[in-house]
Image (cartoon, rainbow, N blue to C red):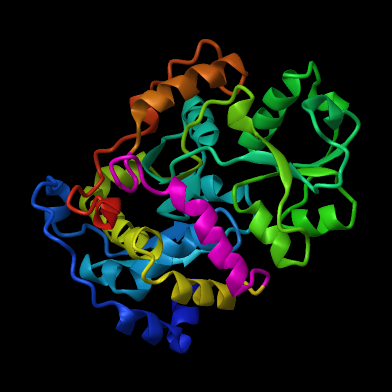
Amino acid sequence: MRIVKSILNGGIALAIVSAFAVALPNQAHAQVNPLCTKAPEVKKMSMMMDWLPYFSWAPFLAAEAEGFFADEGIEVNIIEPPSVADPIKLLVTNKVDFAISYVPAMFSARDKGIPVKTIAALQRNLSAAMFWLPDTPITKVADLKGKTIGLTAKLDERAYLKALLATANLSLNDVTIVDPGFGWARLMLDKKIDASHGVVTNPASMAGIGGPKTLSGFKYRDYGVPNYPWLLIATNDQFLAANSASTCRFLRAVSRGADIAIGRRTKTQALAETINKMNSAYTVDTLLHHARLMEPDFFDDQGRFGTLNLAEWEVARKWMIENGIIAKDSKVKVDEVATNAFMPGEYPSGLLKK
């Protein structure tokens, strides 16, 4: 199932590719990862996303449309997930080569002996929050008692809600949980749920279906959850051991895609139009709103895309032990779960914004 090709070959690719004529500036100060100088071990790879197409797909779509994957001698099949819980399952069974995942899921998997590893951050900040309509009578965490909450089966969502409720001496037993799938916004507008777990793009998605332009919410990182990365690019140990150069080249292409999609924003409009063709539930205006809301999460304070702050991961590890996501006697170490070893070096994309 080659989603990118099926969309871009319809004519949209020409508009995107022909528009790219900006030369990369001199980045001699950036050290090149030797892995990226080697020939790719495998040329055809798959990347499973974690959600229906929205602007988090932009770096990958740009890398495809602009020929950045081709520049690296690789082909990447970008795949929509059957459900939000499937990417890591398919990753560990070698059904896909790369997948979007989350910090709690990665620690939990490794704690169970599942050999998965994070190789880059897609969104650097924990953008997860609990959202509700402005006219819903919720002003403090205690007001969630008795409410119906939209929450999928993902491990991290339950942990975040549990931590949030604990600040008001509430537990999961004090709320009713409904799995909204991909339809949280409609369920909220129809008053079938009172609030829902969500991310920074939720206000844009709600406005895009005729709802209010703003939502009220609690950011989990303001209620005891560490601010570690939100979306991760992950793979498994077996693939890394056999395909280190292919992995480095893949990340170099994605870094370049992130730069023009979000950093310099030279292709934001074209990519929004492409994603709209893939998922008409999001209008072009909604996707452009997504881009504006997400942009601060893609680059660190040095303008780099993808690099992991492993000190943040150590804080996250301790928090997950305290909250029962991984066992108190867990021997899992941060360097088993996350690494910067495959980042390309010469394309720290955000530097191109300076």
Task: State the image quarter where residue 340 is shown.
Answer: top left
Please state the horizontal and vertical placement of residue 92, each as a whole percent of the image. Answer: 47, 44
Magenta highlight on residue 287? yes
Q: Is residue 309 above or below residue 79?
A: above
Q: Position of residue 30 (x, y in %)?
A: 14, 47
Q: Is residue 134 magenta?
A: no
In percent of width and height, residue 112 lies at 52, 27
Q: Quadrant of residue 146?
A: top right
For this orientation, the residue located farthest to the left is 28
Q: Residue at x 55, y 16 (%)?
A: 321
Residue 284: x, y in percent? 58, 73
Q: Can residue 346 be seen by looking at this rendering?
A: yes
What residue appears at the point 32 percent right and 41 percent down from the top-left corner?
307
Q: Residue 20 sits in which quadrant? A: bottom left
> Over which residues does the magenta segment extend?
281-307
Q: Is residue 182 above or below residue 174?
A: below
Say which of 25 and 280 sits in front.
25
